[in-house]
Amino acid sequence: MIAHRNLGLVSAAATLLAAAPLSAIFERWTWLVQAVIAVAAVAAAAALARLGRTPTWAQILAMVGGLILALTWLFPSGDELLAVLPTPATFGHFAELIIGSGEDMRSRSVPVPDTDPLLFVTVLGVGAVAVLVDVLCVGLRRPALAGLPMLAIYSVPVAVHVESVPPVPFAIGAAGFLWLLVTDNVDRVRRFGRRFTGDGRDVDVWEASPLSAAGRRLAVVGLALAVLVPLAVPGMTAGLMSTLNSGAGAGFGGPGLGGSPGRVDLFAALSGRLNQSEVTDLLKVTTTEKEPFYLRFGVADDLRADGFRVRGPSGQRVTGDLPDPARRTLPGIERTRHRATVEVSRDLDMRLLPVYAEPVGFAELGNSWHYDPNLQVVFSNRENSRGRTYSFDYVRSVYTPQALRGAQPLPADLPLRAQQTVTPDVPEVAELVAELIRGKRTEYDKVRAIYDYFSEDNGFTYQLNTEQGTSGQQILDFLENKAGFCQQYAAALAWMVRNAGIPARVAFGFTNGNRRTGDTFTLTNRNLHAWTEVYFDQVGWVPFDATPTYGVPGSARSAWAPNTDAPEESTPQPGAADTPDESDPSAGPDRGPNRFEEGVDPGAIAGDGTPVRSTPVWPWFAALGVLAVLALLAVPALRRLALRRRRGRPAPTFRTVDAPDPDSTDTGQPVVVVGVDPDRARADAHAAWDELIDTLVDYRVRVDRTETPRSTAERLAGEPLRADAAAGTAVRLLCRAEERARYARDPLTGEPLPAALRTVRDALAGQADRRTRLMATVLPPSVLHRWRTAVADTSARLVASGGRLRYRLLRFSPRRLIANRTGR
């Protein structure tokens, strides 16, 4: 029963360790605290059930009951009895949480916040796995099968994480499973008695059991292969290796864009790249178009209270026939066909490909890539963009304001309008939009009224570092502070256009930048950008960029969406690009105090106006980790050195006493008598002998605890130290001191025991091989053996104390009480 109890506790701990990979999908650690409570309730219920020697099915019911009580306390509905006893309303509340978890899984991106539905299903799953692991390990004694439910926990982050799960949580879970196997096998192997090597010889104190040593080696090798092989095989992971191999991080889209496109937080990923102080080349694009518009790769069109979200794309393979907008001709719309070639660097790692809007044909792409004509994005669920080169044909559409004014409002029952015009209820935004579009009759005029509102005349400026508001709504904070960067401008414009009843969304991509060689543009993380796209009937999605041009290098403006901060006469013609340069006053540094390139932190600008390259932080963490490992490795050596110094400095073996002098005429005058302190001399002799034994253990010389000191000295002087007469004499001296300390009335005093120890140690070190000397210095076997013995003794005392407590509790066992009553 004691072994079963220990195995039950280890099963619960191993389940929690196996849940470590769940940390990759949650923003905070609330799930872990609640999972610990649930698993503790399951383990406590199992222990109480086994205390009464109940059958396995009763133990399962007890564990399920403990899990239900824990869930009731953690996720109450308000109708519980005594806060932990569930009612029918409680189970109804649980069903609502499960339904809500499905909605959260579809709508939220990784890492997810602490919502009750997601926390409930997580704690429920971990608790159910704890029940299964306990049944398999304790009830059926099949701990190897417990790896299956533990693996089920790990499969959850693997399935939903946008990138490969970090290896450290996997290593923690694997360690828990190995712990479970070792605990079960210790009880099975313990029955064999004393350890032996297989050739009839007992295992010395410094030697590990061959069976356990082989098991540890296999476990370490297997765990190392399981962690390192996926990191080394191309295509299996892009997490740790990419981070270590690139000073700029895992690349834009590493942790944020690497997984399924339906779980991408493009806003967070874009913000992370823009705030980096180091400039990284991400791609090169060559196009036949003289002044192209923005290169795009993603769209966020699911508006919620906390901002725009990305929906999972769906579409056809790019190798098939794609929709060609040039086949539709409308007055006031000019469509031209162009070709572009994109070379993606290895720093841009995502499951989306940058393309110009409205592509009609691709080359160098296989069947793994698909095109969503509604979102106008190219995506893949198996491959990524890193290091890829591809060409495609696309159609560039240029609109006149008259053509957009002719677009009619979409029908109210049209699914596109119903989906793309839903906005959270923020009365302040609705009132502002109603005021701006008052008197506007066409859809385009309403959009232009909202678009023109984001101008410098109304107080809007470009800033990377924005102030926190107090309204509780990010859009209200932005509209009140009137300072932000492209993400906020794009999201605010799309939100307000939707409030006007017109479909709008946020697009992500690259501007044209300011590094152009002929027809080739080199785009960096500084050119990442977000803008708004508005849908017009019979026309399609039309781009509007409300971000101030001076904050966007390579900004493009058009006749339908001109630069609102530029003079009226400088409005570009249809299709022309308005790229800020040195001759443009609107792009100069004298326009205001907040004129910096997008993504360049003003605090990271040097005196000459160039960004300061920050030193990567990971080398410092790596150095700290190495120092911590070295410090841990040095603990045994320091402990051995301290013990040796304490034993090598014996205290004086003399003591002084006051006694009357018999020859003195003054009988009352005491004299000082110096004598030998036998207790101190014995302690020094024992310390010297203990140091000798530890030295023998360190240098792998056989130690027999049943030998007398004289037999040990003669054996050492005859075999290991035969060639060194001084060492043999020193060993005999230490032996004589130990014998006198043990058996004689008067111990040996006045002998140089520390010098004898040094002589023996030097002789043994001179005869040992290099590996033995290194281990004796760095990881002394005597210290490790003493620690193992201390841990075993402590564990034995705890087990004995637990056994005594159990026997006391058995007095109140229901079975015993019933048996006693029946006997009477």
Image (cartoon, rainbow, N blue to C red):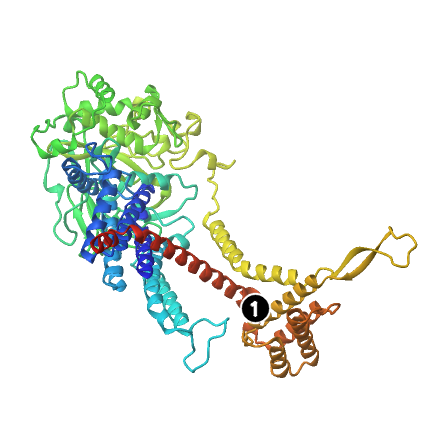
How many discs appear?
1
Is residue 282 left or right of 441 when viewed as pictured? Answer: right
The residue furthest front is 824
Residue 274: percent from left, percent from top: 37, 39
Q: Residue at x 91, y 52 (%)?
A: 666
User: Which image quarter holds the C terminus?
Assistant: bottom left
Q: Nearer the viewer, residue 468 or 297?
A: 468
Amino acid type of disc 1? Answer: Ala
Residue 75: percent from left, percent from top: 24, 38
Q: Nearer the viewer, residue 771 or 598?
A: 771
Q: Residue at x 22, y 32 (%)?
A: 304
The residue that disc 1 covers is 776
Q: Nearer the viewer, residue 778 or 753?
A: 753
Instruction: For residue 623, say whether it is visible.
Output: yes
SS category of the residue bearing label 1:
helix
User: Which image quarter holds the N terminus?
Assistant: bottom left
Instruction: For residue 158, say whether it is visible.
Output: no
**Label 1, residues with CA under 10 Å away: few <14, some 14-19, many ≥20:** many
Residue 438: percent from left, percent from top: 18, 16
Residue 584: percent from left, percent from top: 38, 29
Is residue 686 left or right of 748 when viewed as pictured? Answer: left
Is residue 15 left or right of 434 when viewed as pictured? Answer: right
Q: Residue at x 46, y 75 (%)?
A: 203
Residue 525's image quarter?
A: top left
